[in-house]
Amino acid sequence: MKRGDYFIVLGALIALPWLYLTYWSGSAPGTQALIVDGSGHELTLALTMDRQVEIAGPLGASVIEIHDGKARFVSSPCTGKLCIHAGWLSASGTVAACLPNRVSLTITGHHARWDSINF
């Protein structure tokens, strides 16, 4: 290794913890739930009001519950139920989706987490 290589390694060792703390660690709590169905219709609901909503999709109705500042899929007609297994969402930028039924749930807020950088 040459002297320039050491500077690059040292720079990466300094930059990576800073990037992690700045972009990937935690996020602000969400303020709204954005629900989108297969036809592109959007429904924005405040996380401060507890409720359940049914969203129609090609396979049937998906039920989304909002309670105590969190949201989740309660039921959905898909086979894998990955949307239900996502559990409660509360942080801004988190997403759960029922792809076979074409329904998605996104928590929005003032500061979103950079989840896509991890992929």
Image (cartoon, helix red, strand yellow):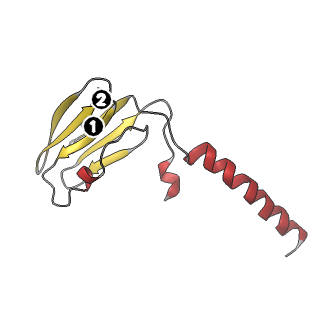
The residue that appears at 48% across and 38% down in the rendered structure is 112
- On residue 109, the disc is none
Considering every residue shown, the one lying at the far bottom of the view is: 1
- Compared to residue 72, the image places residue 119 above or below, namely below
Q: Amino acid at mark 2?
A: Thr
- Compared to residue 7, the image places residue 67 above or below, namely above
Q: Is residue 110 left or right of residue 85?
A: right
The residue that appears at 78% across and 57% down in the rendered structure is 11
Q: Amino acid at mark 1?
A: Ile
Inter-mark Cα distance, 2 to 1:
6 Å
The quadrant in which residue 9 appears is bottom right
The quadrant in which residue 74 appears is top left
| Label 2 residue SS | strand
According to the picture, the residue beneath numbered tag 1 turns out to be 35
According to the picture, the residue beneath numbered tag 2 turns out to be 44
The residue that appears at 18% across and 51% down in the rendered structure is 101
Q: Position of residue 24 (x, y in %)?
A: 55, 48
